[in-house]
Image (cartoon, helix red, strand yellow):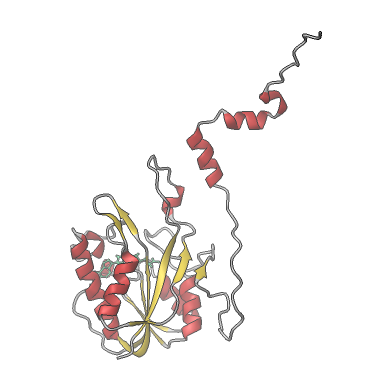
Amino acid sequence: MNTTQPTRVPFSTINPFYSARLSRPHAALQAEQQRRPVYAKLPLAPINASPVPHLTSLYHNSLAGDYGDRAYPGNCGGNLIRDLLRYFRPATVLDPMTGSGTCRDVCRQLGIYCWSNDLHNGFDACGPSPFHAAFQFCWLHPPYWRQKIYTDDARDLSRAPTLEAFLDGYERLLANAANALMVGGKLAILIGDYQDRQAGFVPLTHHTKRLAFGLGLRQHCTDIIRFSHGASSSKKVYRSSFIPGLHDVCCIFEKTF
Ligand SMILES: C[S@@+](CC[C@H](N)C(=O)[O-])C[C@H]1O[C@@H](n2cnc3c(N)ncnc32)[C@H](O)[C@@H]1O
């Protein structure tokens, strides 16, 4: 009888890279895997007469475009704004929470008149509005309540002490935007749901629609799910377990009254 045992070759000899990976802590391994891009196959969009055929309900442009300032907290890429403006072709745009000026820069490139301002310059978009029926399009990218704090000004929506206070200010913002639009004008709002440390999950997309419908606006078309490429949170490592939100939502309303 042959009692010789087969020689056990250590993993490290067969594949030293695999062995090194196995010996790494689980969190580090997971973090490394998450750094790799994942490619998903998107559904085919039907051919139609849209002047911007790649503008669909899934907006996945990973390039921000050369607009605004990517270093500004809460900055959004300009390509979605550019595509919306190419689609709706307004002659006049209102941008009352401009941040680093992303919408303003897109309008400049497209040769569209744009009125831009922000609380950073002392303009309160939730206060009494100077505009009535003056614009064909309004772009709003408000704070997602206190996910990021923007200014020291107490009128800053991101400084609202409670969700109720935030929603009161948000409703005044939407009312001002609706009032500033001409009949047939479009209001595009980029908003995201938000996990608050104290209040828990805050469904801001739901509140946006609830408030907009309450003001008499109607939804004009599909929501646009914007993939959040480049979000600062995607580089963080958390100890807790949760389902990461990788998108925000652009809701497009029409003023019909
Ligand atoms: C999400 S950021 C907009 C970022 C912008 N889309 C960009 O790409 O740079 C929200 C902006 O709302 C402004 N803001 C907050 N409360 C405001 C208010 N009551 N009136 C006007 N602007 C306000 C903040 O200063 C901040 O610049």
Q: Where is residue 94 in the image (x, y as percent from the top left)?
A: 35, 80
Q: Nearer the viewer, residue 238 or 220?
A: 220
Q: In which quarter of the image is the C terminus?
A: bottom left
Q: Quadrant of the N terminus?
A: top right
Does 116 sit above or below residue 150?
below
Residue 21 in view (yes/no): yes
- 228 sits left or right of 116 in the view: right
**Quadrant of the picture in which ligand 1 is shown:** bottom left
Place residue 175 in its image quadrant: bottom left
Residue depicted at x 54% and y 66%:
61
Q: Nearer the viewer, residue 255 or 76?
A: 255
Residue depicted at x 48% and y 72%:
80
Place residue 50 in its image quadrant: bottom right
Q: Farthest residue toward the front?
A: 1
Q: Nearer the viewer, residue 44 or 69?
A: 44
Q: Where is residue 142 in the image (x, y as percent from the top left)?
A: 32, 68
Q: How many marks?
A: 0
Residue depicted at x 54% and y 30%:
24
Residue depicted at x 24% and y 54%:
199
Does 175 sit above or below residue 19?
below
Q: Where is residue 219 in the image (x, y as percent from the top left)?
A: 37, 80
Does 211 sit above or below residue 120?
below
Residue 69 in view (yes/no): no
Q: Farthest residue toward the right?
A: 1
Q: Where is residue 97 in the image (x, y as percent from the top left)?
A: 32, 71
Place residue 23 in its image quadrant: top right
